[in-house]
Image (cartoon, rainbow, N blue to C red):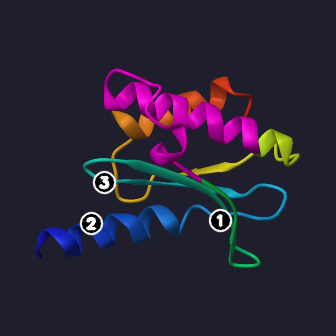
């Protein structure tokens, strides 16, 4: 099996155990080499409630990518709480819970989002 096939297999395995609802949306994280993206998804209606990326942060944060990922999590939590969303289900996709993915989760927790 090639790399993409293994990645899809991991993603399906994680996604089968995680489902977002209106009251408790799924916090999905996507990581590219340059940026990281996070969004809150309601799987019942199949729509994105809220989405943020490192592009929203701008250039004001200097430092490592993991520092920017933590700030992204804080921003996501702040926006989610303003929309009266306090809990979520974390979806790491095909990525290991390590590095930037872990930093997004910790930032969201620090911001007040529970999962």
The residue singled out by tag 3 in the image is: 32
Q: What crowding class fits label 3: few (fewer than 14 Cα within 10 Å), some (14-19), or many (20 or more)?
A: few
Q: In which quarter of the image is the N terminus?
A: bottom left
Q: Which residue does the image show at 46% across and 43% down from the upper left?
A: 54
Q: Which of 59 and 50 is in front in this view?
A: 59
Work out whether mark 2 precedes mark 1 in sequence or the reverse, and give the earlier one: 2
Q: Which residue does the image show at 43% across and 32% down from the upper left?
A: 59
The residue singled out by tag 2 in the image is: 7
The residue singled out by tag 1 in the image is: 19
Work out whether mark 1 precedes mark 3 in sequence or the reverse, and give the earlier one: 1
Please identify the dominant SS of the magenta region: helix
Query: In this picture, which residue range is highlighted in magenta?
Result: 52-79
- Quote the CA–CA distance across marks 2 and 1: 19 Å
Verify whether residue 61 appears in magenta.
yes
The answer to whether residue 115 of the structure is visible from this angle is: no
Work out whether mark 3 precedes mark 2 in sequence or the reverse, and give the earlier one: 2
Residue 38 x/y as whole percent: 53, 51
Vertical side of 6 occupied by 71: above or below: above
- Please tell me in which quadrant of the rendered image residue 72 appears: top right
Q: Nearer the viewer, residue 100 or 11?
A: 100
The answer to whether residue 15 of the structure is visible from this angle is: yes
114 left or right, relative to 65: right
Vertical side of 24 occupied by 46: above or below: below
């Amino acid at each position: 099996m090639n790399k993409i096939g293994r990645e899809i297999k991991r993603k399906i395995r994680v996604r089968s155990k995680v489902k977002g609802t209106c009251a408790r949306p799924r916090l999905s994280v996507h990581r590219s080499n340059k940026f990281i993206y996070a969004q809150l998804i309601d799987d019942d209606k199949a729509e994105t409630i809220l989405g943020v990326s490192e592009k929203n942060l701008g250039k004001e944060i200097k430092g490592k990518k993991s520092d920017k990922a933590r700030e992204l999590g804080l921003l996501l939590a702040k926006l989610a709480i303003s929309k009266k969303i306090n809990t979520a289900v974390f979806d790491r996709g095909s990525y290991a819970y390590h590095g930037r993915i872990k930093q997004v989760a910790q930032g969201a927790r620090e911001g007040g989002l529970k999962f």
